[in-house]
Image (cartoon, rainbow, N blue to C red):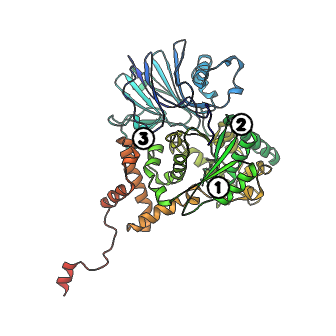
Amino acid sequence: MPTTDNALPPVLGFHARVGARGEPGPAPRRITAGEAVPFTGGTCSGRLLAGSGPAVPRTADGVTTLLAGELYHRDGLPAALGGIADDAELLLEIWLRYGRAGLRLCNGRFAAVVVEADSVVIATDHAGSVPLYVRREEGAVHVATEAKALAGGGVDLALPGTEPVPGTPGVLRVRAGSAVTLRPAGPIGAAEWTRTWTPPLHRLALPPARAVRRVADALDAAVRTRVRGPVTAVLSGGVDSGSVAALASRAGGRLTTVSLGTDAGDEFAAARVVAEHVGSDHREFRCGAEDLVRQLPWAVAAAEIVDAEVIEYLLPLVVLYRALPPGGRLLTGYGADIPLGGMHRGTAELASLDDVIAADMAGFDGLNELSPVLSTLAGQWTTHPFWDRDVLDLLTALEPGLKRRDGRDKWVLREAVRDLLPESTVRRPKLGVHEGSGTTGAWTRLLLAHGVRTSEVGAVKNAMTAAIHRRVVGAGEHPDAVSFDDVLAAVLATRAAPVIPAQVPPVWKAVVS
Ligand code: AMP
Ligand code: MG
């Protein structure tokens, strides 16, 4: 699998403490792979989780910046910001010139900390695609890119621009598109929340041909800025990942494509059609569906959420990332369905389609579907062109008649990539990764085999996810130390016995006879 020195950003994640007299402190709990590099700079200290390149904070004029992840619009930033070593320094230059408002300029996949004088600003990208967590203690704040680093002790507290993390008292998640300003030594009431992005609510009525061209151009630009040497596209064979693979191939990077299947299902034939068309070096990975489901603790430890339905989408991808050799830059087709309404094929009226798109765009925050930890746990860096800020703004804003047209879903995207892909791929209906890989079915079958009633499957899946979350996030246990079967047994033991006895117990028999 191809790798280069810049396949990963310099910093994949961090744990920082901001307050008087900083010391790096003990290594934080985390499942991000790679070295944890200690640093101390003024009142800020902690560890940077190294990717490729030097993992260092950047400091000038009394301002220090930490940045996990990367920025995507270096070409578009003012020439005055030239001669920049890395994206932490770019953020520093933006800050020195524009202050906090400069965060509204940043199109990237990042979480950042900016320390200046007695205040600290903690910031997410537009989509919150690198989850960021905060906990306060007397005279200091702790900030980390994994909630488990901050768990254990603490009382619930409210902070503007944040949400509590279930099962971890005192730990708050910074909302998407947000910058929260705190004074570690000051009163909590002085915290301020600045929004740096919100999903567009207006809609653009464009001539269809123009809309198609704009989508083609925006997606092409998003893929190009993400191709930095050899890349791998995770390929289902659908139109979303197919588009990304085709554009990556056109952008000139050496392209590998990878597909995951199980003994319960695969989309290998559809993926091969794309791979042959775009000329990628294509690999297939197959594993047992039950083995895949038993890796559930890894998916929960990475996503740090308790919603089993979302975990079902993420689990096959985590399994795929774990199967790949480390050090790769992975492009996915994840997330195209949200602004385009691809999950709502049954919604006939355009007004309803637009309403569900608006609701989905208002509700993605906190699902952590784009978290880099899903792949950095295996030393991979993922990036998602469909959730590039410019692509997402455009796709969301297009009027729904461009998304549903001529009886087709995701019409504008399918037309935009018509020349790049085989006709069968352009027309292919959506199949979720959890369906194509048989993940949902395999987990359900395991539960049914343990006597769980069909009507209870959803509740048991959620209870298992929450139980695993308590262990791998709340208590910081290693995912390999948490057995799927033990968790299932424990969950079933705490529920009212759902199994109806097949025969009359012996003691009753004695009474009856
Ligand atoms: P989906 O749920 O089908 O929208 O999947 C989201 C993204 O995950 C796709 O765009 C692909 O990049 C990736 N993906 C889905 N299924 C597979 C698979 N079987 N093998 C590899 N990548 C996949
Ligand atoms: Mg799919």
Given residues 276 and 353, the one toward you in this image is: 276
Judging depth in this view, the residue of 236 and 416 nearest the camera is: 236
Residue position marked by numbered label 2 in the rendering:
224
Binning the other alpha carbons within 10 Å of mark 1 as few (below 14), some (14 to 19) or many (20 upward) gives: few
User: Which corner quadrant of the image does residue 222 belong to?
Assistant: top right
Horizontal side of 75 relative to 50 (left or right) equals right
- Name the kind of residue labelled 2 in the image: Arg
**In the image, residue 210 lies at what x, y percent?**
81, 44
Does dot 3 land on a helix, a strand or a loop? loop
Q: Is residue 376 visible?
A: yes
Residue 400's disc is none
- CA gap between label 3 and label 2 equals 35 Å
| Marker disc for residue 352 | 1
Give 200 or 368, whichever is nearer the viewer.
Answer: 368
Could you tell me the amino acid type at mark 1? Ser
On screen, 241 above or below 447? Answer: above
Tell me what residue is drawn at x 71 percent, y 27 percent: 75
Q: Quadrant of residue 448?
A: bottom left
Query: Measuring 65% from the left and 38% from the top, which residue is drawn there?
Result: 388
Of labels 3 and 1, earlier in sequence is 3
The disc, 3 or 2, on the residue closer to the chain's N-terminal end is 3
In the rendered image, which quarter contains the C terminus?
Answer: bottom left
Mark pair 3, 1: CA separation: 32 Å
Looking at the rendered structure, the kind of residue marked 3 is Val
Nearer the observer, 1 or 359: 1
Residue 94 image point, x, y percent:
62, 21
Q: CA distance from mark 2 to mark 1?
A: 34 Å
Residue that mark 3 sits on: 165
In the image, taking residue 148 as reference, residue 267 lies left or right, namely right
- Asked whether mark 2 and ligand 1 are closer than 8 Å, the reply comes as no
